[in-house]
C-alpha cells in the first residue's frame, strides 16, 4: 500500500478520539518510517507517550527532535526541548550536559556556568572525580578568565592527589589574579603551589612580581636571590637584575651581570642592560669599568668572533662616555682592543715634537 501521510494522521486522530493512544502512536510511527525527520510527528509521539506515563520512551523521541534542531542550527529550539527532557528526568545528567554545551555555543555563559557547576557537584557526590574535572576543564575553556573555576579545578586536582596538575593550576590561577591586580589572592595561590613544590620557579617569579608591583623591591629581590642557578639566565635573572637597577643597586646588578657573563661568555644581555642604565644615570666611569672587564674576559676566552660583533656597540659606548666625561688620556687597552680611542690634538702635537727632538739629537 502506497504511503499517504494525510491518511495516517487522519487515522491517528480517530484512534485518539476513541481513547486508543497506543494505536494512534503506531500510526504516527508509520509516518516516521518514511519521514524520520518529521519534527511535528516526533513531538506528537513524545507527548502521547507522556500521556501514557511512558517517560523514557517520550524522552527518546524528544531527544531525536532536539538533535535535528541542533543539526539544522536551531539552537534555541533545541534548548527548549532539552529543558523539557531535563524536567521529565531530573536525575539524568545527559540532558543537563547537552543544555550546558548548547548555552556555550550560544555564548550564554550565565546559563551554562551554573549547569556545569551543578553537574560537577553531582559527579563529586557520586565519587566520579575525573568526570568532574572534565566538566570544569570544559567550562574553563569557555571562560579562561574565570578565576573561581581555576581555583576549584586546582583544589580538585590536589584532592585527587594529582600534584603536578594541581601545581600548574595554582600557578595559572595566581598569574590570572596578578593580572587583575589582586596581589593578595595571587600570592596566596602562589604559596599553595610552593607548598606542593617548594622550589617551583614559576610561583616564585609570580610572587616576586607581585611584591615588585606593590613597591616592595627589597622583598622581591630577597625572594629571587634564593633561586638556584641565576647565572644561567632566564626570566628570574632578568627580573632580579631589573629590581637591582630600579633600586640603583649598581654593585649587585654588576655582580649578577658578571655571574651570567662568566657562566656563558655569549650572553651579553645583562651586561649591556647594566651599562645602558649606568650611562643613562650618569655613571659613565662604572660603565667603562664593566666594559673593560667583559672585553678582557671575552678575549681571554677566545671569543674573537663575538667580540667583533659587539664592536659597534662598544665603540658607540666609548664615544658617549667621552662626551659625558672628558678623559685626560686614552683608556689603556690590550692589542686588538675594542676600546681604543683616538689621541687628542694636543697629544698628537706633543708626539710630533718628541719625534723631532729625537731626530735632531
Image (tube, helix red, strand yellow):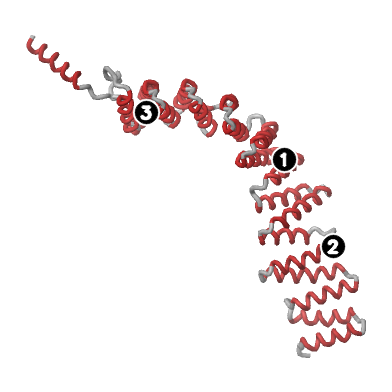
Image position of 119 (left or right of 311): right
- The number of numbered badges drawn on the structure is 3
For the C terminus, which image quadrant?
top left
Q: Which callout, 1 or 3, points at the residue further toward the start of the chain?
A: 1
Which residue: 81% across, 85% down?
9
Give the x, y percent position of residue 316.
32, 31
- As drawn, the label of residue 303 is 3
Q: Determine crowd level at label 2: few under 14, some 14-19, many 20+ residues with C-alpha closer than 10 A.
A: some
Which residue: 77% across, 86% down?
5
For the N terminus, which image quadrant?
bottom right
Question: In the rendered view, would you say 205 is above or below 324?
Answer: below
Q: Residue furthest right?
A: 19
Which residue: 77% across, 47% down?
129
Which residue: 34% across, 29% down?
317
Q: Determine crowd level at label 1: few under 14, some 14-19, many 20+ residues with C-alpha closer than 10 A.
A: few
* Contact (Cβ within 8 Å) of mark 3 with mark 2: no
Pointer 2 residue: 89
SS at circle 2:
loop
Res 193 → quadrant:
top right
Q: Is residue 361 visible?
A: yes
- As drawn, the label of residue 162 is 1
Q: How far apart are marks 3 and 2 (CA)?
A: 76 Å
Amino acid at each position: 500500500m502506497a504511503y499517504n501521510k494525510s491518511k495516517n494522521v487522519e487515522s491517528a486522530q480517530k484512534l485518539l478520539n476513541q481513547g486508543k493512544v497506543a494505536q494512534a502512536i503506531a500510526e504516527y510511527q508509520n509516518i516516521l518510517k518514511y519521514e524520520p525527520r518529521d519534527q511535528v510527528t516526533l513531538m506528537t509521539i513524545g507527548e502521547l507517550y507522556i500521556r501514557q506515563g511512558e517517560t523514557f520512551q517520550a524522552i527518546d523521541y524528544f531527544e531525536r527532535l532536539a538533535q535535528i534542531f541542533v543539526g539544522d542550527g536551531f539552537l534555541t529550539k533545541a534548548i527548549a526541548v532539552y529543558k523539557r527532557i531535563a524536567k521529565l528526568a531530573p536525575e539524568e545528567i545527559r540532558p543537563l550536559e547537552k543544555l550546558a554545551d548548547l548555552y556555550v555555543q550560544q555564548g550564554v555563559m550565565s546559563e551554562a556556568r551554573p549547569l556545569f557547576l551543578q553537574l560537577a557537584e553531582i559527579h563529586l557526590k557520586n565519587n566520579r572525580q575525573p568526570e568532574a574535572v572534565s566538566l570544569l576543564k570544559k567550562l574553563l575553556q569557555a571562560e579562561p578568565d574565570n578565576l573561581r573555576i581555576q581555583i576549584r579545578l586546582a583544589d580538585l586536582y590536589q584532592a585527587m592527589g594529582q600534584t603536578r596538575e594541581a601545581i600548574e593550576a595554582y600557578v595559572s590561577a595566581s598569574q590570572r589574579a596578578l593580572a587583575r591586580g589582586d596581589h593578595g589572592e595571587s600570592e596566596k595561590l602562589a604559596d599553595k603551589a610552593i607548598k606542593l613544590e617548594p622550589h617551583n620557579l614559576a610561583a616564585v617569579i609570580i610572587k616576586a612580581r607581585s611584591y615588585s608591583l606593590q613597591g616592595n623591591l627589597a622583598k622581591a629581590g630577597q625572594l629571587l636571590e634564593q633561586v638556584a642557578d641565576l647565572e644561567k639566565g632566564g626570566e628570574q635573572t632578568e627580573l632580579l637584575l631589573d629590581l637591582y637597577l630600579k633600586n640603583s643597586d649598581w654593585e649587585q646588578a654588576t655582580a649578577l651581570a658578571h655571574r651570567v657573563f662568566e657562566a656563558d661568555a655569549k650572553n651579553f644581555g645583562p651586561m649591556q642592560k647594566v651599562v645602558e642604565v649606568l650611562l643613562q644615570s650618569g655613571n659613565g666611569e662604572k660603565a667603562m669599568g664593566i666594559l673593560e672587564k667583559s672585553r678582557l674576559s671575552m678575549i681571554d676566552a677566545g671569543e674573537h668572533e663575538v667580540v667583533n660583533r659587539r664592536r659597534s656597540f662598544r665603540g658607540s659606548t666609548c664615544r658617549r662616555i667621552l662626551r659625558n666625561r672628558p678623559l685626560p688620556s686614552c683608556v689603556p687597552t690590550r692589542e686588538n682592543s675594542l676600546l681604543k680611542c683616538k689621541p687628542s690634538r694636543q697629544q698628537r702635537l706633543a708626539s710630533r715634537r718628541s719625534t723631532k727632538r729625537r731626530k735632531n739629537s
